[in-house]
Image: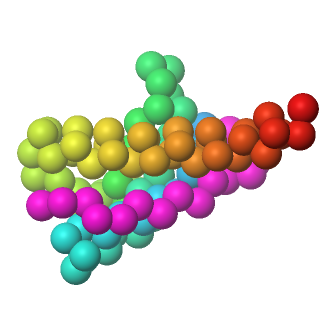
């Protein structure tokens, strides 16, 4: 499995939610609405979920093992950090 595309949509408002991401896997399968969240220990991702009848949130799509979750999270957070750096570049050029 290869993550072949990552699209980051940064969230403008203040709060723990920093971005919403879509990933493409093997140029054939897309997962939308992965959230980048600022937690107490730093950034992490939350897979797309929906609220069930009992009021709990359940993932709609998610990796089956921790190695795959870590690979997806690392790829997404790297792209998120790149998007923040690109945002700051024009300001650095103007100075």
> Would you say residue 16 is visible in this rendering?
yes
Q: Which residue is at the far bottom?
A: 28
* Most foreground residue, 14 or 72: 72
- Which segment is the magenta one? 1-15
* Most foreground residue, 30 or 37: 30
Image spot of residue 79 (x, y percent): 46, 47
Image spot of residue 78 (x, y percent): 42, 40
> Would you say residue 53 is visible in this rendering?
no
Relative to 85, residue 35 above or below: below
**Which part of the image, by quadrant, shows the N terminus?**
bottom left
Relative to 51, residue 68 above or below: above
Left or right: residue 55 compared with residue 14:
left
Image spot of residue 30 (x, y percent): 31, 74
Left or right: residue 27 compared with residue 9:
left
Q: So how many labels did they put on this image? A: 0
Q: Residue at x 53, y 58 (%)?
A: 8
């Amino acid at each position: 499995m290869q993550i072949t595309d990552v699209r980051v949509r940064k969230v403008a408002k203040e709060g723990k939610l920093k971005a919403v991401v879509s990933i493409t896997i093997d140029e054939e399968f897309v997962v939308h609405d992965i959230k980048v969240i600022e937690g107490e220990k730093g950034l992490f991702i939350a897979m797309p979920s929906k609220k069930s009848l009992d009021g709990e949130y359940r993932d709609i799509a998610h990796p089956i093992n921790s190695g795959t979750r870590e690979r997806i999270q690392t790829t997404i957070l790297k792209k998120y950090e790149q998007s923040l750096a690109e945002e700051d570049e024009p300001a650095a050029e103007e100075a």
